[in-house]
């Protein structure tokens, strides 16, 4: 085996900690502060036997990994902004890509709780009413997504994690621009409107109310309209 073969460079993968609707999430035994995300079989089946030298094959390979590609673009834009701000974006960092026996893996920063274990999601925290401090932190996260001009399409409560060390919420999934023409990435006002819609959708999945005027969550679900 030479160092040019991909097998010689395969990233060792640890236990699976979660499986979302699109990806498996694994620990990395050699880097406890990171996680590895691999596309689920429904995406990888489509590229079995694909030839990347053909136009059709290459398109299918790109499509199967579109999620990684849009997250990486959004992360890279956020870091450009971070370079001129004294702040860190409200996203989990992306360290790069690695090859694994089950496909291409995205290496990300692992968001942890006070004990160093995988952090709780907003969905976990909402099993009880949010404390006033947590609600304030959630609304600081909301304001940060607008301020950092983060394109996002799925702000479901399982994609928002509580980072204990920094006392803030962090988005780990559902960000990036899905459009062929990335107008929301270019035009802040369009992105703001998309975020308005995404947060209104979040409120439908949580016992929280979205106030579109203040762009903030409030305690309690909105009563169902007759
Ligand atoms: N960076 C991270 N740090 C800690 N836990 C994470 C991180 N990313 C994902 N997770 C956990 O894994 C779950 C699924 O990950 P996610 O990226 O949302 O997968 P999918 O793209 O399939 O929805 C999340 O709900 C969260 O519990
Ligand atoms: Mg998810």
Image (cartoon, rainbow, N blue to C red):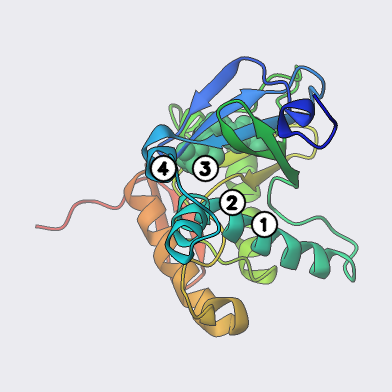
CB at mark 4 closer than 8 A to ligand 1? Answer: no
Q: Residues within 10 Å of mark 3 (few under 14, many from 20)?
A: some
| Marks 3 and 4, the one that precedes in the sequence | 4
Residue under label 4, please give it: 43
Nearer to us in this view, 163 or 208: 163
Mark 1 element type: helix
Q: Tags 2 and 1 in contact by the CB under 8 Å rule? A: yes
Distance of label 3 from label 1 (alpha carbons): 16 Å
- Select label 3 or label 1 by which is in front: 1
Residue under label 1, please give it: 72
Residue under label 2, please give it: 68
Q: Please tell me which residue is depicted at 57% across the width and 29% down the height of the picture.
A: 25
CB at mark 3 closer than 8 A to ligand 2? Answer: yes
Q: Is residue 190 above or below residue 21?
A: below
For this orientation, the residue located farthest to the left is 226
**Residue 127, percent from left and from top:** 43, 27
Q: Is residue 158 visible?
A: no
- Select label 4 or label 1 by which is in front: 4
Q: Please tell me which residue is depicted at 73% across the width and 23% down the height of the picture.
A: 28
| Marks 3 and 1, the one that precedes in the sequence | 1
- Select label 4 or label 2 by which is in front: 4
Residue 80 appears left or right of 197: right
Residue 62 appears left or right of 26: left
Distance of label 3 from label 4 (alpha carbons): 20 Å
Q: The C terminus lies in which quarter of the figure?
A: bottom left
Q: Which mark is residue 159?
A: 3
Mark 3 element type: loop
Q: Is residue 56 visible?
A: yes
Distance of label 2 from label 3 (alpha carbons): 15 Å
């Amino acid at each position: 085996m030479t160092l040019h073969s991909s097998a010689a460079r395969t990233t060792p993968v640890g236990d699976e900690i979660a499986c979302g609707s699109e990806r498996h999430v694994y620990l990395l035994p050699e880097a406890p502060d990171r996680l590895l995300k691999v596309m689920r079989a429904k995406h990888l089946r489509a590229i079995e036997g694909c030839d990347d030298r053909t136009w059709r094959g290459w398109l299918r390979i790109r499509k199967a990994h579109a999620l990684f590609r849009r997250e990486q673009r959004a992360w890279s834009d956020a870091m450009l902004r971070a370079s001129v701000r004294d702040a860190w974006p409200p996203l989990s960092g992306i360290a790069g890509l690695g090859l694994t026996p089950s496909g291409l893996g995205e290496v990300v920063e692992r968001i942890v709780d006070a004990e160093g274990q995988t952090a709780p999601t907003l969905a976990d925290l909402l099993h009880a009413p949010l404390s006033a401090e947590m609600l304030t932190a959630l609304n600081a996260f909301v304001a940060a997504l607008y301020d950092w001009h983060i394109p996002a399409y799925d702000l479901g409560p399982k994609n928002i994690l509580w980072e204990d060390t920094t006392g803030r919420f962090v988005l780990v999934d559902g960000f990036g621009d899905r459009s062929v023409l990335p107008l929301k990435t270019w035009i802040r006002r369009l992105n703001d409107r998309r975020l308005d819609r995404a947060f209104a959708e979040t409120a439908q999945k949580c016992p929280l109310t979205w106030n579109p005027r203040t762009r903030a969550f409030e305690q309690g679900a909105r009563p169902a309209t007759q």
